[in-house]
């Protein structure tokens, strides 16, 4: 599929993987009796892609609601009533963020990197606070690296962070960013 750029295989692979992962979104909306169960996931992916490519987010979300949920204001899921507009907004934001994070990690690896560094700010949530401002290995190792200024930094296993938890690092409403980190030398 050509989502963003035919030659950008990393981004296309990430989006294809997210399409497969997000099939579970369909079960949420099966109660809405959509004629085509893949319609919602397809529309969220396409809407997310349009926004990534610069489309107005409000127009995309309103278009989705008018097309697929004309007369439906709320749905019930896991005992909670969801406003359809808010659920669409949440799913699109999560899809964009997930694609962005996966693309960043894949691009880091493509460039020969194995480390990321997480931004740091003073009012971080509890789970984020533990993980912010550190260097992490994407390959599951821990040790030390030498920076270009001669400073030695400890690095940690990314798999041991709060990543993947809703309130964890890079989770829902998290403002932290990850950046590729290329040390001068890996010491251990």
Image: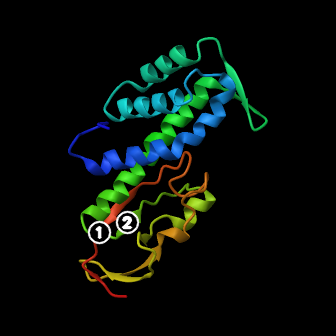
Which residue is label 2 attached to? 116
* Nearer to the camera, 127 or 149: 127
Residue at 55% over, 18% down: 68
Question: Dot 1 surroundings within 10 Å: few (below 14), some, or many (20 or more)?
Answer: some
Which residue is label 1 attached to? 113
**x, y (%) of residue 27?**
64, 36
**x, y (%) of residue 80?**
76, 34
Callout 1: helix, strand or loop? loop
**x, y (%) of residue 177?**
42, 54
Image quarter where the C terminus lies is bottom left
Tell me the distance, in whole angstroms, between the alpha carbons under discs 2 and 1: 8 Å
Q: Residue 151 carries which label?
A: none
Most distant residue in the bottom direction: 188
Above or below, 157 against 22 in this view is below
Residue at 62% over, 60% down: 126
* Nearer to the camera, 170 or 81: 81
């Amino acid at each position: 599929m050509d989502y963003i750029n035919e030659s950008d295989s990393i981004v296309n692979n990430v989006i294809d993987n997210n399409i497969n992962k997000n099939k579970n979104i369909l079960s949420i909306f099966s109660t809405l009796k959509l004629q085509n169960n893949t319609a919602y996931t397809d529309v969220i992916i396409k809407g997310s892609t349009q926004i990534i490519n610069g489309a107005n987010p409000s127009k995309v979300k309103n278009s989705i609601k008018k097309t697929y949920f004309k007369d439906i204001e709320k749905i019930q899921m896991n005992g909670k009533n969801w406003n359809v507009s808010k659920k669409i907004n949440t799913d699109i934001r999560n899809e964009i963020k997930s694609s962005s994070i996966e693309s960043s990690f894949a691009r880091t690896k493509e460039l020969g990197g194995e480390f990321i560094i997480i931004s740091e700010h003073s009012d971080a949530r509890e789970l984020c606070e533990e993980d912010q401002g550190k260097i992490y290995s994407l390959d599951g190792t821990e040790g030390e690296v030498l920076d270009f200024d001669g400073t030695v930094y400890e690095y940690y296993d990314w798999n041991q962070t709060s990543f993947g938890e809703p309130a964890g690092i890079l989770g829902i409403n998290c403002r932290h960013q990850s950046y590729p980190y290329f040390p001068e030398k890996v010491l251990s």
